[in-house]
Amino acid sequence: MPTKSLEQYSETERKIMTDFGNRVRRIRIEKGLSQEKLAELTDVHRTYISGIERGRQNISLLTMNNLAQALSTSIASLITDART
């Protein structure tokens, strides 16, 4: 299945990706990690982390798991904001 361009996602889908990216960024900063360090810990490129945080990457479940492990958190905390 070919990769969708950002414009091909619905507004709801883009919001999901943006909200997810915002949570990744917030937790990364709280943990004192740079994008480069998080990329190293998850075995992806720094620009991919940047894309995730900007809501421009629709990541795989395995990448989500790697992010959660690197951030010492759960996948659930990356998906839903416990503060709301």
Image (tube, rainbow, N blue to C red):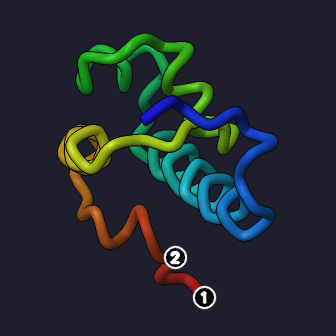
Find the residue positioned furthest to the bottom.
84
Q: CA distance from mark 2 to mark 1?
A: 6 Å
Task: Residue under label 2, please give it.
Answer: 81
> Which x, y percent locates residue 77?
37, 69
Numbered-mark total: 2
Q: Quadrant of the C terminus?
A: bottom right
Q: Nearer the viewer, residue 13 or 37?
A: 13
Three-letter amino acid code of the residue under disc 2 = Asp
> Which x, y percent locates residue 26?
56, 51
Q: Is residue 66 above or below residue 38?
A: below
Q: Nearer the viewer, residue 23 or 1?
A: 1
The structure residue drawn at horizontal position 72% and vertical position 70%, both measured from the top left corner, is 12
Secondary element at image label 1: loop
The structure residue drawn at horizontal position 42% and vertical position 29%, both measured from the top left corner, is 33
- Characterize the local packing of mark 1: few (<14), some (14-19) or many (20 or more) Cα atoms within 10 angstroms: few
In the image, taking residue 17 as reference, residue 54 lies left or right, namely right
The structure residue drawn at horizontal position 56% and vertical position 44%, both measured from the top left corner, is 25
CB within 8 Å, label 2 to label 1: yes
Task: Residue under label 1, please give it.
Answer: 84
Tell me the tag on residue 51.
none
In the image, taking residue 21 as reference, residue 82 lies left or right, namely left
Q: Nearer the viewer, residue 55 or 3?
A: 3
Secondary element at image label 2: loop
> Which x, y percent locates residue 5?
70, 33
In the image, taking residue 77 as reference, residue 24 lies left or right, namely right
